[in-house]
Amino acid sequence: MKASTERKIIRWFHILASIPVVGYIYGPVAGIPRAAWTVKLVLFPLIVLSGLWLWKGHWVKKQFRSAKTAGRA
């Protein structure tokens, strides 16, 4: 998969997964126990991880590539 395609997919996941968080803050989602649990313990960590990947994913890939090539030598 090309890097630009991967970035688009992760960006759209990040944006779409953030919609329930807005509902949790401004809407009635906080009053529904199962939905609140899903937003707090599932979606929010995934949003944070996808944001970190968008920000520093290139660095992580570079570190894995350099460690992989160092292991071969």
Image (tube, rainbow, N blue to C red):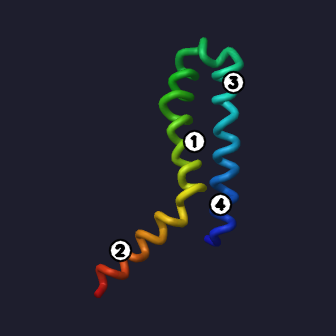
Give the residue pinned by disc 3.
23
**Residue type, mark 4 in image:** Arg
Which callout, 1 or 3, points at the residue further toward the start of the chain? 3
The secondary element bearing badge 1 is classed as helix
**Residue at the image position 32 percent from the left and 81 percent from the top:** 70
Label located before the other in sequence (4 or 3): 4
Amino acid type for the residue under numbered disc 1: Ile
Cα distance, mark 1 to mark 3?
15 Å
Q: Nearer the viewer, residue 58 or 41?
A: 58
Q: Nearer the viewer, mark 2 or mark 3?
A: 2
Residue that label 2 marks: 67
Residue 47 coordinates in the image, percent (x, y) = 57, 42
Amino acid carrying mark 3 in the image:
Gly
- Label 4 crowd bin: few (<14), some (14–19), many (20+), radius 10 Å: some
70 or 23, nearer to the observer = 70
Give the labeled residue for mark 1: 47
Q: Secondary structure at mark 3?
A: helix
* Residue that appears at 29% across and 87% down: 73
Q: CA distance from mark 4 to mark 3?
A: 25 Å
